[in-house]
Amino acid sequence: MEIRIPAALLPLLQAYANLLEERLPGRMKGVYLLGSAALDAFRPPCSDVDVLGVSDGPLDPEWLMELTFIHAKLAGEHEFGRRMEVQYASEHKLNGMRSGSPLNLAAGACYEWEGERFKGIRETGPKPAALWILKHHGIRIAGAPAAALDVRLDGESLRREMSYNLDVYWAWRRKEPDLFLQDLWIEFAVLTFCRIYYTLDTGAIISKEAAAAYVRQRTAACGQPVIDEALRIRSGRGEPVFPDAVQRRRETLRFLDELSDRLPREYELKPWTRE
């Protein structure tokens, strides 16, 4: 286990590595910490624990049974176990994979867990953003170093993921304005849009806080208070930037709408379609 792992996560991840070896001995190529922890921005009060597990062979129903046991135990015994966001993919499908290419669903393309809950199977494998972080910043929890994996990621795959986020995921959320009366959605939306902006501009991925600072310097003055409010919520410190939730919602939606219109034009994104 690498020394870069945040101290708060060590008990959870040691228990996780032990359970994988006990329940699925010798069947993991490696397990890697991604997300904010890999980007040196883990915040115990609010950060998820993003993990990618790479198996030596195809995933099958036995994996599902054992992983269900493992994640139920971790969620029951460790605070951060309930915040785990985990994807499992086989090495055969991951190595040498052109991101965005389809994986074999019958071979167990990619199993996903959220805490103790099995979310389902992603037929297209791990998301390009997860693969980018794995390739450039992945932290080994167990098994082979991240550098030993042959992760081939093309820039267009990252752009397509950003296009999906804008055209599908956030297009629907922006049609539900009452969501943006809540602190959670203000923080999540604004900081995610900042990271989308940064990724399109640079082809890289950084922490949400760093992306917010980057975008704040490049956005109109009217958008800066929205970013400041999202950062305030994330830090849990300071006084609200806006006098009331209704004005905050209005300014947040204006910021999101402006970037949703501007980014596809500025970066010549193709409208997202399922390939």
Image (cartoon, grey):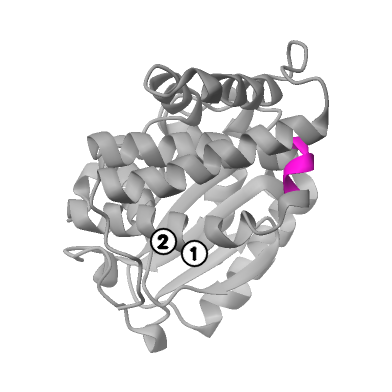
- Point out residue 40 in the picture as x, y percentages from the top left corner: 45, 24
Residue 176 screen position, x and y as percent: 71, 57
Q: Which residue is mark 2?
A: 164
Judged from this view, the residue extending furthest toward the bottom is: 106
Residue type, label 2: Tyr
For the stretch drawn in magenta, the main secondary structure is helix
Q: Residue at x 78, y 40 (%)?
A: 182
**Distance from label 1 to label 2 (Cα)?**
5 Å
Residue most extreme to the right: 244
**Does residue 12 sit above or below 210 in this rendering?**
below
Name the side, left or right, on which 167 lies relative to 62. Answer: left
Does 32 appear in magenta? no
Badge 1 element: helix
Q: Is residue 178 left or right of residue 170?
A: right
The vertical placement of 65 against 162, above or below, is below
Instruction: Return the residue nearer the eye: 40 or 4.
Output: 40
Q: In this rendering, is residue 113 above or below 242?
A: below
Q: Which secondary structure, mark 2?
A: helix
Residue type pointed to by label 1: Val
- Mark 1 and mark 2 residues within 8 Å of each other at the beta carbon: yes
Q: Residue at point 72% right, 31% down?
A: 248
Q: In this orientation, does residue 145 appear?
A: no
**Residue at left offset 47%, top offset 82%:** 60
What segment is highlighted magenta in the picture?
179-183
Q: Which mark is residue 168?
A: 1
In this view of the protein, which residue sits in the foreground, 242 or 168? 242
